[in-house]
Amino acid sequence: MEHLQPYIDGVVGALVSLLVAFVIGVVAMLRVKVTAWLESRTNAQQREILHRLAQEGMAYAETAFKQSGGMEKLTEAFSYVFNRASNYGIKVGADTIRAAIEKAVLDYNAKVKGGGAG
């Protein structure tokens, strides 16, 4: 049995190495999936925050700048959303901010003029 011990040690060592390689592969695969999930979750949360900020920005511009025209209100709402989004660490482009504000305005108008729809 003693003459087989080196072979047994070699086989056990190889099996342990294979097991370690398998575990490392599984961990790497899980890391990629968890990272993708976290990024998608973060993006969803950031979109939700952006839409809430757009609603706030629209309300702010509508109340604070009642005498101003639509473009001035849009500019003020844009400034509000951009600054607040930066405070939250959300980086989005001007088109995305404008689209969120325009959606907030459309939703508000549909709710007010449409009798609660939207």
Image (tube, helix red, strand yellow):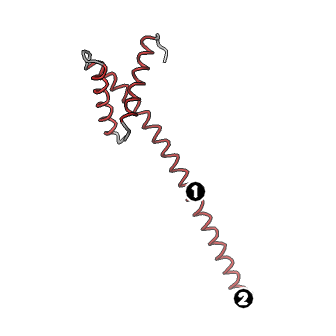
Q: Residue at x 69, y 78 (%)?
A: 11
Q: Which mark is residue 47?
A: none
- Tell me the distance, in whole angstroms, between the alpha carbons under discs 1 and 2: 41 Å
Front residue of this view, candidates 26 and 95: 95
Q: Residue at x 27, y 23 (%)?
A: 72
Q: Secondary structure at mark 2?
A: helix
Amino acid under disc 2: Glu
Q: Mark 1 vs mark 2: which is more N-terminal?
A: 2
Front label number (1 vs 2): 1
Look at 45% across and 15% down and name the residue there.
Answer: 110
Label 1 element class: helix
* Residue 114 screen position, x and y as percent: 46, 11
Report the amino acid beneath label 1: Met
Residue 69, percent from left and from top: 28, 18
In the picture, measured across the screen, residue 100 lies left or right of residue 66, that is right
* Residue 29, numbered label: 1
Which sits in the foreground, 2 or 91? Answer: 91
Q: Quadrant of the N terminus?
A: bottom right
Q: Quadrant of residue 100?
A: top left
- Rendered location of residue 58, percent (x, y): 34, 23
Near-viewer residue (52 or 114) = 114
Count neighbours of disc 1 (C-alpha within 10 A) and say few if under 14, some if 14 to 19, many if 20 or more.
few
Tell me where residue 64 sits by quadrant: top left
Spot occupied by residue 48 in the image (x, y as percentages of width and height): 44, 33
In-image side of 74 versus 22 (left or right) = left
Q: Residue furthest right?
A: 1
Residue tagged 2: 2
Q: Is residue 37 above or below residue 47?
A: below
Say few, some or many: other residues with alpha carbon within 10 Å of mark 2 (under 14 / 14 to 19 / 20 or more).
few
Up-down relation of residue 42 to residue 104 (above or below):
below
Query: Which residue is more in the foreground, 3 or 117?
Result: 117
Looking at the image, is 116 positioned above or below residue 53?
Answer: above
